[in-house]
Amino acid sequence: MTRENPIWTFIKYLSLLIAALGILFPPYVIVTNAFKTPEEFVNKSTMSLPDSFLNFSNFGDAFVEADMGRAFGNTLIILGVTLVLNVLLGSAFCYAVSRFKFKLQGPLVGLFLFATIIPQITTQVVNYKTIQGLGLTNHLMGPTLLYVGADILQIYIYLQFIRNIPYDLDEAAMMEGASLFKIFYSIILPLLGPATATIVILKTISIYNDMYTPFLYMSKPDKVVVSTALMRFFGVNSGDWQMVSSAILIIMIPTAIMYLILQKYIFAGVTSGAVK
Amino acid sequence: MLSRLPFGTQKKIIIISFVALPLLLLLTFSYYPALELVRLSFTNWDGMSPDKDWVGFKNYHEVFSNSEIFGVFKHNVAYFVVGIVQNIAAIYFAVVLNGKLKGKYFFRLLLFLPYILNGVAVAYAFGYVFDTTNGSLNFVLGKAGLGSETSWLGTEKFVNYTLASIGFWRFMGFNMVIYLAALQSIPGDLYEAASIDGANKWQQFRFITLPNIYKIVELNLFLTVTGALEVFDLPFVLTNGGPAGASETFVMKILETAFQFNNYGLASAMSVVLLIGVVIVISIQRFFLSRKGD
């Protein structure tokens, strides 16, 4: 092996350092200010460290002020219902499409693929009327209904997994007298575990971070979710920043922790969708 | 009970019952609204009244002739420009992290981090960073003697670039991870053969790396263009389209037209124009991709 050019090595590490500082700059500012008292905030510079990282009073205020208890509760309900239904519907769909031969098999998957070119953001004008017609505006099940449908990424991930499960397993179970339903939920579904984990994690992140849907479909204050909780604060340039900073932290931390623990699944999901 | 039915019958039941619901959801919330949009775009529907009058191409004429509507696309240009720079940076960092490097997993973890954080929380965090009087960016710039009075979100000339730079912060790592996956799928012996033949690092990048990740570059560029056309949350949360409408985007305009001014006909026509724009981008991409494949 030839040795690397030292100038290139230097540029490499310098650019990474700059990128790392750029990434960490906003979170650093938020973390330091979230722990400051109002007096510290006025008297000290914005980049300085707080006197104590144990001053949690801002967090308490933010939690009450932004109605975070309710926001997290609502988000959890939406997540719970969506994930259970989405996994069941998505995996069942892929089981039916990949295990049996029938006409329209190809066009069916194609229909899901083609749907991705319709920007979801433009169809809301009509979807709003549909959800309203079902009586689901200002109802947690409104956004849930929009989230629950299978997307093409999920279908790709499941199809790939199901094809790798040997058909011998199905046949053996059939010999034993199991029905096809039973084969699906007691053999296929459990074996899809890792794929389901990836899908659940990606779906959780995208629902937790989605502001557009809950904002549009649930404008009543008691239907606040995590994404919309912050928006009741202000008028961006007003407000006390210590409290807002701690509210921002409360909202960022759950996905950040999830990311650190489950990064393997997240990277797998993101790349398997794209490199297809 | 079910197991007593012949497998042929079971198969039919499974196919119908397992496919029906996902298909129904897809048709109801993707295909029906797309078609309905087209129909509504030729009417003057106000969103409530039972009657819709057919108005022909009047709404489309309005979209293209009213500079307050179509002119808004100018604001989306900033997101496109920054998006291109973002892709170049993403390729650069992907190449760096794909080589010999200490702490490459740490850097990948760090650069991807912004992507999974809540968008509204990120927007507000940047609202603080960019704040004119209390903001940490102006504070740092002031310390460096570069002027500390810039109103990053209040200046018409570059408010869209300020907002787009937040997009850069959020999505560069995402693009990078996709590029990285593509780089890792290039067989290593290609590089070995090239270096035996005396190709330097740049030549290897130019003639091995780039052609091999070409499809992924296209994919990312496509995401960049459609993302730029569909920008909504950053300006909505941070500037609400201000100052003086300078950061309003096309999607914000659609929602305003539909839900504030109750002009569903016009809003539908605008949505159709956006939809067609996206389809054109995809078609162009497919065209180049298939030619490249020959």
Image (tube, coloured by chain):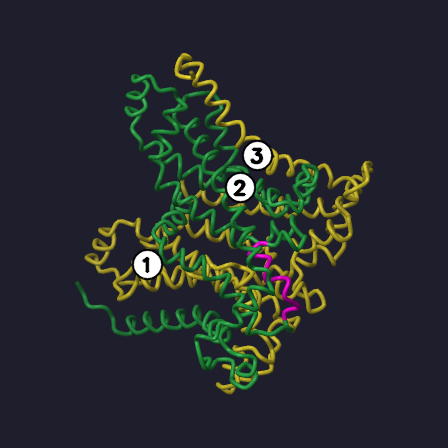
Chain colours: A green, B yellow
User: Which residue type does callout 1 highlight?
Assistant: Phe
Q: Which residues are magenta?
A: A225-236
* Residue where numbered disc 1 is placed: B205
> For mark 2, does the 10 Å Cα neighbourhood hold few (<14), some (14 to 19), or many (20 or more) residues?
few
Q: Quadrant of the C terminus of chain A?
A: top left
Q: Quadrant of the N terminus of chain A?
A: bottom left
Q: Are marks 2 and 3 in contact (CB under 8 Å)?
A: no
* Tags 2 and 3 both on a single chain: no
User: Which residue type does callout 2 highlight?
Assistant: Thr
Question: Circle 1 sits in a helix, a strand or a loop, which is it?
Answer: helix
* Residue where numbered disc 2 is placed: A116
* Residue name at image x 61 percent, y 54 percent: A224
Which of the 4 quarters of the picture holds residue A145? Answer: top right
* Residue where numbered disc 3 is placed: B25
> Is residue A226 a member of the stretch shown in magenta?
yes
* Residue name at image x 52 percent, y 32 percent: B22
Cα separation, mark 2 vs mark 3, equals 14 Å
Q: Are marks 2 and 1 in contact (CB under 8 Å)?
A: no
| x, y percent for residue A53 | 43, 75
Q: Is residue B260 left or right of residue B180?
A: right
Cα separation, mark 1 vs mark 3, equals 45 Å
> For mark 3, does the 10 Å Cα neighbourhood hold few (<14), some (14 to 19), or many (20 or more) residues?
some
Q: Provide the chain ID for the residue under circle 3.
A: B
| x, y percent for residue A162 | 36, 32
Question: Circle 3 sits in a helix, a strand or a loop, which is it?
Answer: helix
| x, y percent for residue A267 | 37, 52
